[in-house]
Image: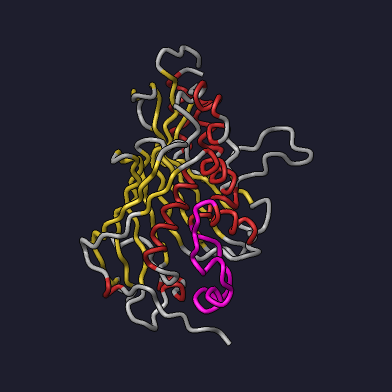
Amino acid sequence: MSVVVAPQRLLGDVAAGDELPALNYEVTATTVVLGALATRDWRPMHHDKDFAVNRNGTQDIFLNTPNQAAWFERYLTDWSGPHGRLARVTFRMKGSVFPGDTMCLHGVVESTEVDEVGCGFASVAVTLSVDGDVKTTCAARIALPVSPDDNPWARRGDQWRPSPAP
Amino acid sequence: MTPDDALSGALDLIGKEQYHEVGEFPVERGYVWTSCASVENGNPLFWDDEVAGALTGGPIAPPSMVSVWFRPHHWAPGRTEQALPLQVHFDLKERFGLPEAVMTDNTIEFHEPVRMGDVLRTHQVLRSVSEEKTTKLGTGRFWVIDVVYSNQDGALVAVESYTGFGYRRVGDGSS
């Protein structure tokens, strides 16, 4: 018999301007290397400081792109709960995140909507910054249940539209 | 190859499907847990079978892991050349003689969830190549590459779009 899991956050609980709790995390070389290996990214700038400095011209090894995606997903679903279904993320790297940095993820709800097939979405702007300097921005669209018995994960085919209508 | 030939050849590739590939291994939970551990992701969908059963019909992988299932092993028996993920990106670096590169933008649109045991398929599509530009990193070109993922049943799993910048460092005359 399957369990009943109550949603942590409904679309109706969310409004434009809401701030998500900030997440602060002290990045170490282990963070960078673990993230690179967890994403099967064997490129040396994510584990070899000598290569990163002398070939890439960066100050140290740095967080790779797929691992940053994992950080953004974790941040968003910490807030949404397990019913939250990521639909689309767009992020832009403005600077690198190095060992010794304390990265801060912070999000603001920009808008909410219910699409033409009844799926609820929140659009959230997330920044990843170090000492107030924005390193990466992430525009995320995440589905949230519109009622206690709604489950965005149950949507298939044409009932799931991860990008907003043009 | 002249610079004009290099650009013309690249422009010819825009919109064409390249590098159809099948994942080297089925999606598995060990890697899901390694990924979740790397970012301390405690979402019960990935750790609690009852929650996964109730919400997603069984265990799934974090959507953001979609590209992970395609990165080749660092070594494999019999392989004579280093396999590179996002081969179109490396092809462009070589085509334009740009020794360094970074990714600047990444968009992922998620469709069907990825489940344990799935063997994913992918192909790459070059979307655009810029004129030569100079940034603080050096001089080079931006390009956009889509990576399209589907599962063994042909269902679309995700479309990932990368913007890369291939460049030559300032003062580096090598090509």
The one of B83 and B91 positioned closer to us in this rendering: B83
The spot of residue B15 in percent (x, y) is: 45, 44
Report the coloring of the rendering: secondary structure
The N terminus of chain A - image quarter: bottom right
Q: Residue at x 45, y 14 (%)?
A: B172
The one of A99 and B137 positioned closer to us in this rendering: A99
The spot of residue A112 in percent (x, y) is: 25, 66
Q: Residue at x 48, y 44 (%)?
A: B125
Instruction: Inspect this view and state whether residue B99 appears.
Output: no
Q: Is residue B80 left or right of residue A31?
A: right
Total marks placed:
0
The spot of residue A33 in percent (x, y) is: 56, 41
The image shows residue B133, relative to residue B18, as above or below, that is: above
Instruction: Inspect this view and state whether residue A74 appears.
Output: yes
Q: Residue at x 54, y 36 (%)?
A: A46
Give, as a single range, the part of the protein colored magenta. Answer: B38-63
The spot of residue A10 in percent (x, y) is: 32, 75
Q: Is residue A114 left or right of residue A60?
A: left
**Is residue A87 highlighted in magenta?**
no
The one of B119 and A98 positioned closer to us in this rendering: A98
